[in-house]
Image (spheres, rainbow, N blue to C red):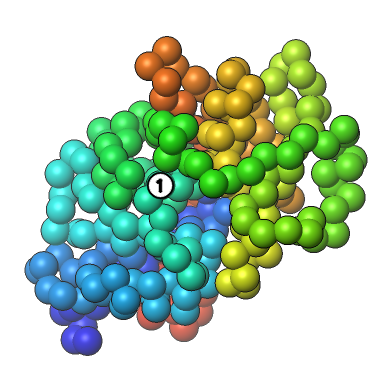
Amino acid sequence: MTARQAPELHVVRVFCGPDGGGGNPLGVVRTARDGSAAVREPAARQALAAELGFSETVFVDAADGGASPRLDIYTPSVPLPFAGHPLVGTAWLLRHLGRPVAALRPPAGVVPVAYEGECVWVRGRPEWSTGRRTEEYATPADVDALSGPPPGDGPLYVWAWCDRGAGTVRARFFPRRGDGIVEDEATGAAALALTHELGRALDVRQGAGSRILTRPYADGTIALGGQVLPVPPRRGCPQPLTR
């Protein structure tokens, strides 16, 4: 791969808490602006996502500079048609790079984007987040007491009410895919599924310090919102987060 073809890697933390803590790290790879074949094939994207090791990595075509660019989402082991934290993080990053978007186009479909101050919102459909099972616990302390994933297979979102009246919940997400990601710090698609099940807006406190906001709409879509912050590049990183 030549320098001209090399993709850009940006890293951000998505769904950060009110104090700037928490947030799920996300890798965003922008492919070469000249339209070259760098990291375009699915096998190459899957391999790079596995090498980077983030819970999700997004691939965006830098040559597709329109208001609704296409993108692909990969975990270290499988591609995803839809995922919340990759879409919120990518929407924030594109605005940070001076290219705000009205929508994003993952494989699931068109995802509207809205910017409200420091909060970035995306809207998805409940059927895009199927396969993620939710399980209610009696108290937030019960959720916190888990030392790892409960027995079983498949994605599991455990949660408990912190304040039912205020719509605040405590949650943790265990992918249980066997690909090295034991627990996700913040997961928008799982929060979307829980919002659909409960039929109300939520303020989700997930992981070590993350916050996910949700809003259901009359058309059946559900918005996911949160704060995003950049991760400064480490010394020796060949692809730092830059403009």
Residue closest to the eye, 91 or 106: 106
Residue closest to the eye, 241 or 137: 137
Residue at (32%, 57%) from the top-left corner?
72
Residue at (23%, 50%) from the top-left corner?
70
Name the image quarter holding residue 170.
top right
Residue at (59%, 65%) from the top-left corner?
177
Horizontal and vertical percent position of residue 159 = 75, 38
Residue closest to the eye, 154 or 179: 154
Q: Amino acid at mark 1?
A: Phe
- Above or below residue 235? Residue 138 is above
Horizontal and vertical percent position of residue 117 = 44, 28
- Above or below residue 130? Residue 173 is below
Residue closest to the eye, 173 or 34: 173
Horizontal and vertical percent position of residue 187 = 57, 46
Name the image quarter holding residue 109.
top left
SS for tag 1?
A: loop
Q: Which residue is mark 1?
A: 82
Question: Does the rendering let one see residue 115?
Answer: no
Left or right: 113, with 227 as reference point: left
- Above or below residue 239? Residue 131 is above
Name the image quarter holding residue 206.
top right
